[in-house]
Amino acid sequence: MSFLIPLSVFFPLVCAGLFLIVRKKLQTHKEICVYTGVVMCVSALLNVLVAAFSTTRELSFVLIRITDSVSLTFRADGLSLMFAILMSFMFVIVGFYSFDYMKHEDNTKRFYLFYMCLMGILSGMYYSADLVSLYLFYEMMTLFSLPLVLHSLTKEAIKAGFKYLFYSIGGALLSLMAIFVIYSMSTNHEFAAGGFLDPSLVNGKENLLLVFVFLAIIGFGCKAGLFPMHDWLPVAHPIAPAPASALLSGIITKSGVLAIIRVVYFSVGADFIKGTWVQYTWMVLALITVFMGSMLAFCENGLKKRLAFSTVSQVSYVLFGLSLMNPVAILGALLHVIFHSIIKDDLFLVSGAIIHNTGAVKCDELNGIGRKMPASIISFTLSSIALIGIPPASGFISKWFLAEGALTSDTGAFSYIGPVVLLISALLTAGYLLPVMIDGFFKGNSEDAKEPFSDEAKPLSLVPIIILAALALILGIFPGIITGFLEGIAGSILP
């Protein structure tokens, strides 16, 4: 069944190629959506099948052998399956939302072409068994997600696209240099728990390797919005269509997280950098990003830009948890990867519905919006509560594990500084999300109450919004649904 892995990678890519051939025959928006819907559902099913068969055997597939020691190899482990299933679910949910949203947009064929391509490319990145394979798909992900940012082709979109590309290429170059150095100090290059370095080749070059591991964290951290490589994110997210913004925030940023995990824990090994300046600098940068992103979101009035700054902050919760190199903190980081994807995708989809249906783009324009779009704003409220970390919503669970992991970690003052910064960030998160809910339901003139539901999202858009909001709450009430699986993954990351 190993063939299922390359099939999950190349099926959406081949279908995207066929889409180029038959696109002229797809005359209506409905026909385009049906084609895309079938492709993304089958692609998601293939990833589910990979996960199902991986429970009984290890699935791996060598696609191309470049040299004796370098090959393009796929392998399914717990970490890759977690990311692949999360990505598949989000692409299906956001895809169905987009069918109504994109109905009035131009160039929808181009949008869905790259949408399908991204499903395959992300699967390839998740299943990569070595750094070369991962880097190849990582670069392709940048190139094929760029058109989603450029979609409207306005002056602002082109500017945002160039910024996204500039930061991404800069980060990737830093990472590529690190990969060269890491490969020069190893003979077996496939990911392994504890790393694959050859101690005899590392001996005497430890300081050099530490420098390049740090460059890899900064380089791959660019996609995750880690300071100082974060500035593309609040520019690209607001300008892209809402479905693209959701995927950029919920999925694309997590690709940087995965790449950092593969470098630190599966290439050089956590023991190599634990207690070094690399670990402590990483923690400092993550905490700076957490606080800075929350503060900028608190001061921002634009709805989508506020959510983009929030993503800068929230993804660094994950990076801080990973930098602690503590099993509990790693479990919290993995939980936050999933919860943040669900929550932030929902918030961006609601913001897209608000902008699409009412034209309001500023937070101070949303007075009384809850009376016009009650189901959407209730969903926004539930997801906001989860993001703040108010129990029993899901965000509380992941942040609890992150704080507990910090307090039990052997990181000196950071054991206490970390939870304090996370708490301050949670208060700021409440400060920039709660006013939207309060103003939405309790402010507005009397005219707002005369036409309730007048701007509510259409069912095809509203159902995905409600599903994500329900998950943000349910996974907090019943976290055992996924914590058992994630505990096993955390154990494989830090054995």
Image: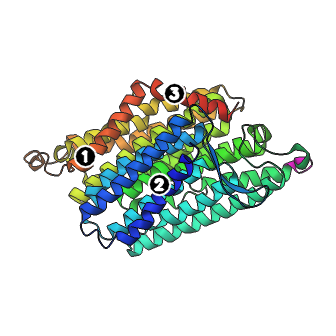
What separation in Å lies between label 3 and label 1 (alpha carbons)?
A: 28 Å
Q: Which residue is mark 1?
A: 462
Of tags 3 and 2, the one toward the viewer is 2
Comparing 379 with 138, the one in front is 138
**Residue in the image at 39% along x and 74% along y:** 153
The image shows residue 300 at horizontal and vertical percentages of: 40, 54
**Residue in the image at 22% along x and 41% along y:** 375
| Image: 59 above or below 97 | above
Which numbered disc flags the more N-terminal residue, 2 or 1? 2
Q: Which residue is mark 3?
A: 483
Q: Which residue is mark 2?
A: 119
The image shows residue 271 at horizontal and vertical percentages of: 78, 37
Q: Which residues are magenta?
A: 202-206
Of tags 2 and 1, the one toward the viewer is 2
Which numbered disc flags the more N-terminal residue, 3 or 1? 1
| Residue 126 falls inside the magenta stretch | no
**Element carrying mark 2:** helix
Circle 3: residue type: Thr
Contact, CB < 8 Å: mark 3 with mark 1? no
In terms of secondary structure, what is the magenta stretch mainly? Answer: loop
**Residue in the image at 21% along x and 50% along y:** 457
**Element carrying mark 3:** helix
